Amino acid sequence: MDKFLITGGHPLEGRVPISGAKNAALPAMAAALLTQKRVILRNVPRVRDIGTMRSLLDELGVDSSVTHEEHGNRVEIEARRLLNPMAPYELVKQMRASILVLGPLVARFGQARVSLPGGCAIGARPVNLHIKGLEKLGASIHIEHGYIEARAEHLKGSVFTFDVVSVTGTENLMMAAALSDGETVLENAAREPEVVNLADLLIKMGARIEGAGSDEIRIQGVSELGGTEHTIIPDRIEAGTFLVAAAITGGHLVLDGVNSAHLTAVINKLTEAGAQITEAGPDKLEASAGHEIRAVDVTTREYPGFATDMQAQYMALMTQAEGSSLITETIFENRFLHALELTRMGADITVNGRRAVVRGRTSLSGAKVQASDLRASASLVLAGLAAQGETLIDRVYHIDRGYERIEEKLSRLGAKIHRVFE
């Protein structure tokens, strides 16, 4: 199993390109199921989850190809036919985003059999909102042998209000509604940039969508969609991770290919904590430690609030801040697993339910630690970069799911990090 070996204490310096957002690329790949025409996606990141989605599309009988380009991959998808409307457990258990094929399959082919995702380390991610929404659109759904069985002659537009904000739920229903009869209104919809990116793709394919980026999205169904070309937005979480990397190592970085508008909450919080972050030109951010890092409380919220996917990285930074900070997690009920591993490295963290108190500044020292999920992996890498001595991080397949060759990017910036095989 792959591991990262990090020797800390080296400030990061240089320029780093930000990859495309895997959380935007995955629904875009699923959206290609809505048409028999070719869909071409650019700036697709080279990460494990993209490979899993390609395997799923192959299982369905969809043709796809990948071409390496200067900025990410070019992925071509052509869903001329459907050989098998099933998303098997073996693939869904690797990536919960596999549920995104449910809406497109029902909308275009009238049937789908998608495995229930099962448990998740960071907390419950129920798919009941996906099911309720599709039922509101006229699909007949039942659960059997661990699979969601869905059928529909014709989906019909309706009004659906999400009980809680759901990004993948919003994306799934928006895709299904694009081929429905009549108008669909999604209330309390997710506002994330990835939802907007998907809406932009669907509109290019011929969908009629208004309001993406707000909490009310209106979709006027059409009879068919066509092919198009589309560019995936930059990964705001990868960008935020490198902003923290500059601050926690006392370094100086320029991030290329970033959309700062997607990072407002993160930039504001890091600036409040003492980091210096400025616009360095179109699609560029310059980041350095600036003054002494100060302890600042943070609460995760749905977009445009502080992203839950940045909470673990921010906790790593707060171990090096002067004073005590309170981190409140409102999205997932079990997203502090990384705190136990950070304490193995010398951090002073007390977890009480959805709140964690981080007392800084503590001297981190290298240790053997284990990643529990994707963003926890990133926090341990950041801690390892700031620690004295060697840190060995196990189960880094988690980080490969969402960060494109992060050890190579960090190495080019002066980090002492190597992938080791055991």
Image: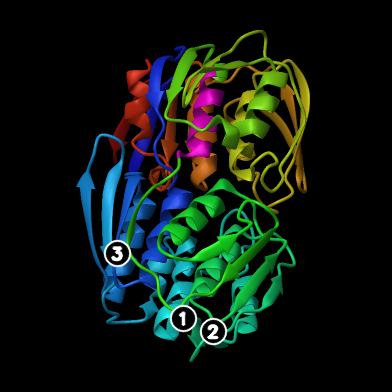
Closest to the observer, 362 or 204 = 204
The percent position of residue 255, horizontal first and vertical second, equals 45, 23
Residue at the disc numbered 3: 55
- Which residues make up the magenta segment? 234-246
Front residue of this view, candidates 374 and 148: 148
**Which amino acid, mark 2?**
Leu
Dominant secondary structure, magenta: helix
User: Secondary structure under badge 1?
Assistant: helix
Q: Which mark is residue 180?
A: none
Could you tell me how far apart the alpha carbons at marks 1 and 2 are, in whole angstroms?
8 Å
> What number of labels is visible?
3
Quadrant in the rendering for residue 408: top left
Tell me the residue that label 2 is attached to.
Answer: 155
Question: Is residue 242 one of those drawn in magenta?
Answer: yes
Graded by Cα atoms within 10 Å as few (under 14), some (14 to 19) or many (20 or more), the crowding at tag 3 reads: some
Q: Is residue 269 left or right of residue 77?
A: right
Mark 2 or mark 3: whose residue is earlier in sequence: 3
Residue 403 location, quadrant: top left
Neighbours of disc 1 within 10 Å: few (<14), some (14-19), many (20+)? many
Residue 3 x/y as whole percent: 36, 38
Question: Looking at the image, is mark 1 or mark 2 nearer the viewer?
Answer: 2
Residue 140: image quadrant is: bottom right
Decide if residue 8 is in sight here: no
Q: Amino acid at mark 3?
A: Ser
For the residues labelled 1 and 2, say whether their Cβ atoms are less than 8 Å apart. yes
Residue 106's tag is 1
Q: Nearer the viewer, residue 139 or 252?
A: 139
Q: Earlier in the sequence, mark 1 or mark 2?
A: 1
- Under circle 2, the secondary element is loop
Please report the residue visible at 38 percent of the width from the left and 53 percent of the height from the top: 49
Disc 2 versus disc 3: nearer the observer: 2
